[in-house]
Image (cartoon, rainbow, N blue to C red):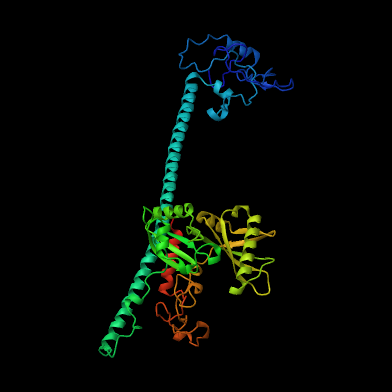
Amino acid sequence: MGDDDDPGGDTSAWGPTSLAFSSTAPSQSQSIFCKSCTLQFIPSDSRFKYCTDCRAKLSSKPKASKRDSATALFSLQETNHPKQQKDDNFPFLFDKAFEMDVDSFLALDSAAQTIKFKSFFAKLEEEAICSKSEKALMAKKIDKLEKEIDNRATLHSDLNKAKKDLITAKLSLADKDIRLFELLSSDKSVKTSSLAPPQSASNPPSSNTPTLKNIPLRAGVPKRPVLIAHVGSSDSGSLPMSEVSNDKIDKLFDLEGDGPVVQNIKKIDGRLILSFLDVASRDKAQDLFNKNPAQNVFRSVSVPQKQYPALVRFRELQGISHLKGTENKDARVAQERELKRRLIIDNPTLRGELESVRVLHQHPNSNSFLVRITVSNKSFCEQLIKTGRVLLDGLTHAVVESDPRKEVRHCSKCQKYGHIHHFCKSATSVCGKCSQNHATSSCPSSPKDFKCANCLQNHQVGSNACPTLAKAVAQYLSYISSD
C-alpha cells in the first residue's frame, strides 16, 4: 500500500482505532476525484479519498500478518473516524512534533512510522541533554555568585580593619612629628647652651631655657578609670574645696580596710578628678560613696560618660537667641534646657538619648541657628546622622556630622589643647599668631610672621597644617571610636 493508500471504510488493516479526530462533513455540492479510479464523487467525510467501490475493493484485500510489537505503533479501529477538536487536553502538538499532520502519518507504512518515532524520541533525548547542560551552567553561575558574595563580605571586613589601621597610622605619624619637634627643640637648646657663657654662682642658669621636660607630650585624654566628685560650698552641707584633703578622701574610701586606693587627684573648677587603678576599684569607690554618709565631703560622684556630637541646622527657631558671656550663663542654660525639652517632644526617639544642646551660631538678621547636640549612644548618633533630619515646630531641620577639629578642646589663653580658657592655669596669655605673650586679638603680625605656639612652624594656632592639632584630632577620634 502506497503513501496515499488510505483504505477508508469502517474497517482497516490497521486494527481498531485508538485515536479519534473530528472533522466537519463537506457539503453535497463538493466533489473530489477518487485516488484509485479517478472518478468524481461526493465524499461523506472530508477524510475519504476513495470512492465507495474502491474502498470496498481495498477493504476486501487480505489483512496484514501479525505484526511485531515494535512496529505496531498505532492501532486504529476506524481509519476514517472523524477527528477530535485539538484543545488543551491534546497531549502535544502532533504536527509540530512529527513535522506532518496525522493524515500523512497514518498513510505511512510501519517502517516509516518507526523511523518517525525514533526521530521524535531522539529529539526528546537531545532536548533533555540540553536541559541538563543548561542546569549545569546555571549551577556554575550560582556558585560564582555565591563566591562573589563571600568576596564582598571579606572586602567589607578588610575595609573596617583598614579604617582602624588608618587611625593607628595617624596616631603613629603624629607621635613621630611630635618626637621630631622635640629632637629639633632639644638640639637648638644644646647649641644655645654651648654658645652661652659658663655657668657660675654669679651667672645662674635661666629658668626660661627650653628643655625637653617643658614640652607637653600628650593631650589630656584620661588613661585610667576616673570618678568625678562634685564639691559643694560650705552652706550646702559638704566641705568646700579648700578643706578637702587626701586624708579625708582616703578615710571616705576605707583606706584602713580593703577599700580602693585613689591613684591621683586633680582639682578643676569645683570638681575633683579621682583616678583609680582599674574599673573594679572605681566601681567599688562609687559603691562606698553611695552607701556611706559622704555628704560632708562630696556633694555627688559620677562616672564620666562619652558623648557623641552632631550638628543641627535649624531653619526657623522661635524663642531662642545666641547668648554669650558669663553674665548670661543662667539664661543660656535655661534656654538650652527648654530647647532640649522641645526636641524630645517632637522627636520621641531622642528620649533617653539626648544629653545636651548648645547654641553655637545665629545667622545675622534671621532666626536660623547652628546648634550642637550630643547623645549618649554611638550607634544612635550614627543612625541620627544617617537619617539626616529632626522635627521641631512642624519643620524639618538638617542633621550633619560634627567636624572633629572643632570638637578638640583648645585654650584661647595658653593655646594648648585638652582644656578651655575657663580652666586654664597659665598666668600669662600666649598669642595664637606670633606665640608672644600678648592677646591674639591685639597682635599686629602679618601671615609671613606667624609662628605657631605649639609646633613653632610658620602658621597660626589651629591651622590644618599643624602636627600638634593633627595629633589632638587623632587622639580624639581614637577615644570616641573606642568601645
- Please state if 378 lies on the left or on the right of 34 as rendered: left
Image spot of residue 377 (x, y percent): 52, 55
**48 lies left or right of 131:** right
Residue 225 can be seen, yes or no = no
Between 140 and 165, which is closer to the camera in this rendering?
165
Left or right: 174 with respect to 391? left
Up-down relation of residue 438 to residue 101 (above or below): below
Q: Looking at the picture, how far across and down is residue 123, in whole percent?
A: 47, 30
Find residue 330 and report its horizontal and vertical position in percent: 62, 68
Q: Height in image: 174 above or below 80? A: below
Residue at the spot x=32%, y=76% of the render? Answer: 212
**From what the image shows, is residue 277 above or below residue 181?**
above
Question: In the rendered image, which quarter contains the C terminus?
Answer: bottom left
User: Is 352 drawn above or below residue 36 in the view shown?
Assistant: below
Position of residue 432 measured from the top left corner of the image (x, y, whole percent): 47, 80
Q: Nearer the viewer, residue 166 or 415?
A: 415
- Nearer the observer, 110 or 457: 457
Q: Is residue 285 visible?
A: yes
Q: Name which residue lies at 41% across and 69% down.
A: 219
**How many numbered marks, from 0 up?**
0
